Image (cartoon, rainbow, N blue to C red):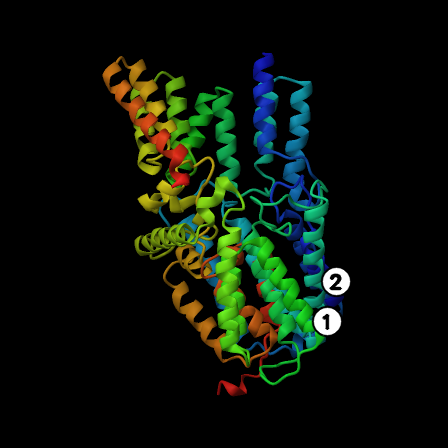
Amino acid sequence: MRKFHESCRDFLSTVLRPDRTGFHYEHQWQLHKLLQELDQSLKIDTLLKRWSQLDSIPSPLARAHQDYYYFRFLVELDESEKAMKLGLMLQRSFPGYYDLEQWLSVLELQNRNFKGSLYWVEKAIDYHPLDESNYFQKSLILKRMGLDKEARKAQEEGLMIGKRNLTFRNH
Amino acid sequence: MLKLWLLYFIAFPFLYHETLYEVYGLRVALFYGLVAVHCLNLSFTGLSKIQKLKPDLLDMALGLWVSLRFVSYLALHTVLDNPPPGWLYGLDTLMLESAAYLFYLCLRLETPNSEFFKKLGFGMIISHLAVVCLQWGWSDFSWVRELSDGRYNGSYFHPNVFAILTVAIFALIWFDSARGCKKAQRTDYHWYALILTLIVLWLSASKNAILGMGVLLFFRSKFRWFILIAGALFFFLFLQLRSNVSPEETFRNKLSHSVSIRLTIFQSTLFAISQNPAGLGTGQYATRIHSYVKENLHSYFPHPKQHSLNKAHNFALEWICESGWLMIPVLLLITWILYYCPFNHCKAALSITALCSLGSVHLNYPEGFLLFSLLLAGMNRDFEEIS
């Protein structure tokens, strides 16, 4: 439980910063209070209820960005159903937005839907072909599916791309 | 009210705090507040002013631009494929643009004179210098932003925004008495402004702004060949000395990479424009461009979590991409009207801001956009020369 609490707090801290400088920042203020609540209570239901209440308040973040964070938050909380609904909605409107497809793949893997997970990681590779983490994710899925040879191939591909990404700025 | 706006723009670089999520958050929040106060003030005291205002060509063309942005917001949520899940998507962009148009109209009613712009230029260049001093000497001060990879950013979103705004302010000062006359006398005040601007350009390491400055001085100066040679020397010296400000980001500061990255972004944007005649929707460039990004860009920015394409680095392309092909004639109309406006300090500043914005992002961020709206309100509207 402690670990869950810390990971939630760390995640929220990266997304939010406490501030109250005007009506435009009401949303951030509400999120800041949410962070404080997290310190006092570990009830996920309360947390999710507060998030949904915030939907009606104008945000300083672009709306897609805010929902993208919320989606990731739901995946981390293992709230599969809600996360999938929001993730699919976002993906339909904003394909390739950050690492949306990779998170959908993670979600499907959590649900043990390997085919679905593979589908989304392939999509992620289409949109971001040089992000090595997609290949490692693919390797993990293939291994879970018992396809060791393909898994090793994906891992090698990821390692090769990762090596290139480490040094390309020096050329 | 003009005094309030003057104070607001002079305090521009200081309207920042490290706890803000968006760098420009406080500036935008205050802007909304001031526009609301200005509109209320006009509704109580300035009704006669409103009645006297006769909209000219530029007002109508800008009105057309705002209307098109509104139509494209509506289209995004009703007609276009795969609409976003709610009406709040794109509303932030639309709100800012509508408020900027209201701000422009309010200033048109107040008719700011050249004295206003002189004070504005002087005040802003001093505040820009002050923020540089703070960044240099007191970097952990929470009201000042930390440097961006060794480049001074003046607490703006990006060093390029800082540098280009400074060049625009310099244009306001440099041409304040000139009024387009090449023989106008410069005073010490103009030369101090020139030196301060060159310092800011050096510290911000913005190639785009240096080119803009060169163009500005070259086309409106008696000593153009001297400026061309001195400018070229300054530019190459700058490239040699400032290209290694941060080892991690060296590749982006190289001229060849910088140009190549921009060209790839333009290609991706043009591809998106060709595929979407009705546009991607107001404020949706950052969220919807990823399906159209060219392979080359991935080789520069492989990790979407670290670098994501958010701006087209060309204001015209971004607006056309968001609002569709109809935006092309509207932008051409505005350019045509602005081209025929008689030359004054605002036209000089506006031209240089727009020119630099063909390869940078500052007009698509609130700071640059608000200053642009202010300069539009200060254009010389003696349209007899057009006829």
Q: Position of residue B210 (x, y in %)?
A: 52, 62
Residue B280, numbered label: none
> How far apart are the alpha carbons under marks 2 and 1?
16 Å
Characterize the local packing of mark 1: few (<14), some (14-19) or many (20 or more) Cα atoms within 10 angstroms. Answer: some
Q: Chain of mark 2?
A: B
Rendered view: B163 above or below B257 = below
- Residue B132: where, in percent of width, then height? 67, 53
Q: Residue, x 44% and y 21% (percent of image)? A: A80
Quadrant assignment, res B178:
bottom right
The answer to which of B372 and B109 lies nearer the viewer is B372
> Image quarter for residue A28?
top right
Find disc 2 in the rendering and name its residue.
B4
Residue closer to the observer: B106 or B305: B305
Q: Report which quarter residue B317 is drawn in.
A: bottom left
Q: Amino acid at mark 1?
A: Gly
* Circle 2 Cα neighbour tier, 10 Å, few/some/many (<14 / 14–19 / ≥20): few
Earlier residue among tags 2 and 1: 2
Q: What residue does disc 1 label?
A: B46
**SS of the residue at dot 1?**
loop
